[in-house]
Image (tube, helix red, strand yellow):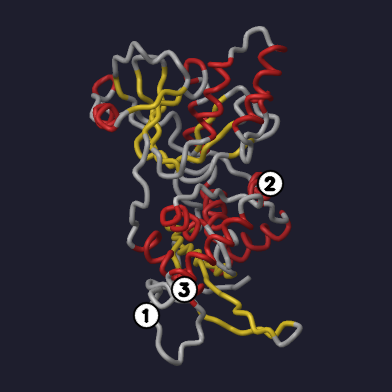
Amino acid sequence: MLINNKSRKVLNYFCGTDYRSSLEDYPAANDSAKKLVEAAKGDVGDKTADSELPDSDYFDMFCHWLVGVQKYALTEPKYWKVAPGRDAKNWEPCRDGNFIAMGWSELGDLSGLSKSDYEERRDKLVAELPDWTKQGANQAWVFSRIKEGDRIVANRGTHEVLGIGTVSGPYYYVDGEKHAHRLPVHWDDTTARSIEENGWRKTIIKLDQDKFETLQKAPPKDGGPQPPPDDKNPVYSLTMLAEETGMDEALLQRWVNAIERKGQAILYGPPGTGKTYISEHMAKHLIGGTDGFPKSFNSIQLTPMRTSFRVSVRKRLMPGNCAIPSFRAGFWISARRRRSDKDAAFSS
C-alpha cells in the first residue's frame, strides 16, 4: 500500500498508532494499513460489482476525502508556548520560513529515538557541558514529540506574543544550525500582542485550551497589528529552491522559463511524491524579492487539477503476470500574464 500524509493521519486515528513520515516507520505503517483495510473489507467505498479497484485504493480515496476535502479533525490539538530563541532573536527566520525552532542542537536528531536512548545521550552531554541540565535538555525531547495539528504560541519573554500557528508536519532536524530542532508551522496570526505571563521562564510550556484562547484575544501591542518589517517577499533564489526540494537546478530553471513563457504548468505523478511541496516552493521563488508577483504576472494560483478527487488506474504487467495499479494525480500551477489572458501548459 502507498502511505502518504493523509492515509498516515487516518491510520494513526483509527489504530491508535503514532507513525511518522519516515522510512523507519513505513514498513510497520504499511502492515497496519493492510490489516485495517482487511478488517474494513466490504465497508470501504461504494464499490460496484464490476469495479477493478482494490479495497486499498478505496481506502486511499476515503483518506483524501476525510482529511483533504472534509478537513475532519482526527485528533484534539494540544497547545504549546515556544520561545524562538533568547529574546525571540530567531523569530523572523521562524516566521518567514514557516517553522519554530529550538536549541540543544548537540543532542542531534531525535526523530525515531527511544526515550531510553535519548536519556543516555542526554546524560552524556550533561556530564560534558557544565551549563546543561537534564531539565533544560528535556525540553528538546518534549518539542520533538509535538504532533501535527497542535497549536503553537511564539513569545518574546513574559510580555509579548509574536505569533500563533498550527503545526503542519512532523519534527525534523537541520544539521549545522544553532537551533536545529524544528517543527513546520503555518502561522495563522503574526499580530504582536501584549500579555502578562510572569511564569513563562522556560523555552517550552504546555498550555490548556482556555489559556490558548485567552492569548488569542490578547490586545494588539501598541494598539494595533504590527506591520511587517519589509513589504517585499523574502528573496528565495533558484539555488535555495534546488537545495530545499532536492531537484536539479538546471531542471528547475527550465520549468521557470516555461512558466514565464507559457503562463502555467502541470506537475503530475503518484500521490505523496511532493507535487504540492514543489509547487509551493516554486511559487515562493517566483514572488521572491518582490512586493507581490513578478512584473509579467498579475496572479499565481496553485489548484488541484480536479475539484472532486478521482484516481485513474492503469495496470502494468510485472514479472509473473502480476498486475499492479499505477496511480496518476496532478497539480496545476497557473501564472496569468498581465497583458494577455492566453494560457498554455506544459507537463512534466
Q: Quadrant of the C terminus?
A: bottom right
Residue at position x 56%, y 34% from top?
A: 182
Name of the residue lying farthest toward the top: 130
Amino acid on which disc 2 is placed: Glu
Q: Which residue is mark 3?
A: 342
Q: Which residue is mark 2?
A: 243
As drawn, 332 above or below 15: below
Query: Circles 1 and 2: CB distance less than 8 Å?
Result: no
Q: How crowded is the residue under tag 2: few (<14 C-alpha within 10 Å), some, or many (20+)?
A: few
Residue at position x 23%, y 24% from top?
A: 219
**Mark 1 against mark 2, which lies toward the viewer?**
1
Q: CA distance from mark 1 to mark 3?
A: 40 Å
Q: Quadrant of the N terminus?
A: bottom right
Q: Quadrant of residue 345?
A: bottom right
Amino acid on which disc 3 is placed: Lys
Q: Position of residue 101 (x, y in %)?
A: 54, 30
Q: How crowded is the residue under tag 3: few (<14 C-alpha within 10 Å), some, or many (20+)?
A: few
Q: Quadrant of residue 175?
A: top right
Q: Which residue is mark 1?
A: 46
**In the structure shown, which secondary structural element does the residue marked by tag 3 occupy?**
loop
Q: CA distance from mark 1 to mark 2?
A: 43 Å
As drawn, 123 above or below 118: above
Amino acid on which disc 1 is placed: Asp
Residue at position x 41%, y 27% from top?
A: 154
Q: Quadrant of residue 131?
A: top right
Q: Position of residue 149 (x, y in %)?
A: 41, 44
Q: CA distance from mark 2 to mark 3?
A: 33 Å
**Mark 1 against mark 3, which lies toward the viewer?**
1
**Mark 2 against mark 3, which lies toward the viewer?**
2
Q: Position of residue 169 (x, y in %)?
A: 50, 45
Name the one closer to the observer, 344 or 88: 88
